[in-house]
Image (cartoon, grey):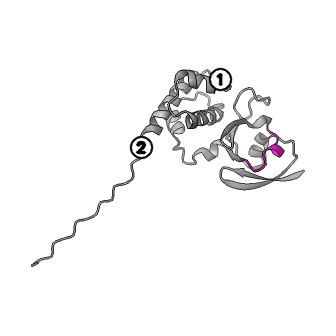
């Protein structure tokens, strides 16, 4: 066993695991972050996708010893209150069927939207081609990504400060 310091979802965490332990199992078993799923174990399905320094990465194929001080972002760290535009769109459009692959789908889509805020259908299909959905919700996933792009494009309005007018004093 070896000790590793990892930057997970904005926090430094320490684990004691074998160097060849896949990041997926470190997240799930050592850090209790169960949102990242095991799908195939060979990097082919995308269910285990996390971001390493902003790049979508198959955590089932990433030995913890190779992570170093890279920033790891999991589905739990995307937005704890589920307010990320993708999470909002997924709920609004009822994208998932069984939901098992959705964390990987959302993490891959988040990287796409960060790089390309207004993707075409072809852009989406290309970026998402490595993520499998056994329920075949691909059209809903594509619609969800388009909807998330729309949500993200709307500027967030800050609360307007309503200053009260000074009251006129009597007899002045």
Instruction: Judge whether 161 appears above or below 83 on screen.
Output: below
Whether residue 160 is visible to the viewer of this picture, yes or no, is yes
Mark 2 crowdedness (10 Å alpha carbons): few <14, some 14-19, many ≥20: few
Q: Is 69 one of the magenta-colored residues? A: yes
Question: Which residue is pictured at 67% across the width and 38% down the height?
Answer: 55
Instruction: Judge whether 152 appears above or below 142 on screen.
Output: below
What's the magenta region?
A: 62-70
- On the rendered image, what quadrant is the C terminus found in? bottom left
Report the number of discs: 2
* Residue at mark 2: 155
Q: Nearer the viewer, residue 124 or 138?
A: 124
Q: Position of residue 3 (x, y in %)?
A: 85, 54
- Quadrant of residue 162 within the rendered picture: bottom left
Q: Position of residue 13 (x, y in %)?
A: 74, 55
Instruction: Indicate the secondary structure of the residue bearing disc 1.
Output: loop
* Residue at mark 1: 129
Q: Nearer the viewer, residue 26 or 112?
A: 112
Name which of mark 2 and mark 1 comes first in the sequence: 1
Q: Position of residue 65 (x, y in %)?
A: 83, 45
């Amino acid at each position: 066993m070896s000790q590793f310091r990892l930057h997970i979802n904005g926090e430094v965490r320490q684990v004691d695991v074998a160097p060849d332990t896949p990041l997926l199992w470190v997240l799930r078993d050592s850090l209790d972050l169960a949102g990242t799923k095991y799908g195939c174990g060979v990097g082919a399905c995308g269910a285990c996708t996390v971001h390493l320094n902003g790049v979508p990465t198959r955590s089932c194929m990433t030995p913890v010893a190779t992570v170093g001080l890279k920033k790891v972002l999991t589905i739990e760290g995307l937005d704890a209150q589920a307010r990320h535009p993708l999470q909002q769109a997924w709920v609004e459009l009822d994208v998932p069927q069984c939901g098992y692959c959705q964390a990987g789908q959302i993490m891959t889509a988040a990287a796409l939207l960060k790089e390309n805020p207004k993707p075409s259908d072809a852009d989406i299909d290309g970026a998402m081609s490595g993520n499998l959905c056994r329920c075949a919700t691909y059209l809903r996933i594509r619609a969800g990504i388009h909807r998330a792009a729309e949500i993200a494009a709307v500027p967030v309005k800050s609360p307007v400060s309503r200053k009260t007018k000074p009251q006129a004093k009597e007899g002045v």
